[in-house]
Amino acid sequence: MTSSRFQAQVESIKGSAVIRLPAAESAKLPSRGQVSVVGSLEGLPLQTVLEPDGRSGHWMKVDPGWEAASRVRAGQSATVEIEPTRSWPEPVVPADLELALAAAPDRGRMTWHEITPMARWEWVRWVSATRSPDTRRRRVEVSVSKLSSGKRRPCCFDLSACTDPELSRNGALLDPD
């Protein structure tokens, strides 16, 4: 896998700074779904997971720490260098899922710890991909149940859709503000 270096516009979507990869750069990636990458943003090292935009492309949220350290702002261009990696960072597990996993039967906790970080990202994305508190609660329950029965991945989930409920509609990343 080779690295890519490019300029990209920093956009603001509902107050979040995001960078959409240019189509040609996104096309080089090994998946239309999430892709773990290492690289740099304005020369600062990064390891992140690029998210699908629901339109055959990819994007990444500019972490507030990166934003402050690199001084990149919405409306500006940023130099990005990325290289896909097989090493996935651990996802941030939402509190509701974390509590449910802690209370899960031994088999569920064991499955969670046995699966790859990439698989954990998929569970977190599936649980988080809704605005409805009731749907989210059901997804947490279903996750624990399926993990407890040995299921390693969520079912029936479009991996190429944008699943951030605050930044997407109908599986596609929103346009900038």
Image: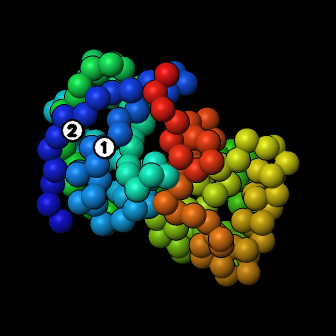
Q: Residue at x 46, y 27 (%)?
A: 176
Structural crowding at the residue carrying mark 2, measured as other residues with C-alpha within 10 Å and reported as few (<14), some (14–19) or many (≥20) = some
Q: Residue at x 73, y 81 (%)?
A: 149
Q: Residue at x 76, y 58 (%)?
A: 139
> Could you tell me which secondary element the residue under label 1 belongs to?
loop
For the residue pair 51 and 70, the one nearer the viewer reads as: 51
Task: Indicate the position of residue 120 as horizontal and vertical percent values.
Answer: 54, 63
Q: Relative to 112, is 75 above or below? A: above
- Residue on which disc 2 sits: 80
Quadrant that contains the N terminus: bottom left
- Residue on which disc 1 sits: 21
Instruction: Look at label 2 and name its amino acid.
Output: Val
Q: On the image, which quarter does residue 109 sit in?
A: bottom right
Q: Is 160 left, or right, of 44 in this rendering? A: right
Q: Relative to 109, is 70 above or below? A: above
For this orientation, the residue located farthest to the right is 134
> Could you tell me which secondary element the residue under label 2 belongs to?
strand
Q: Residue at x 30, y 66 (%)?
A: 30
Mark 2 vs mark 1: give the one in front: 1
Answer whether residue 97 is visible to the viewer in this image: yes
Q: Is 39 left, or right, of 122 in this rendering? A: left
Given contact means CB atoms under 8 Å apart, are the residues at marks 2 and 1 in contact? yes
Disc with the residue nearer the chain's start (2 vs 1): 1
Task: Indicate the position of residue 173 as horizontal and vertical percent values.
Answer: 50, 41
Structural crowding at the residue carrying mark 1, measured as other residues with C-alpha within 10 Å and reported as few (<14), some (14–19) or many (≥20) = many
Instruction: Look at label 1 and name its amino acid.
Output: Leu
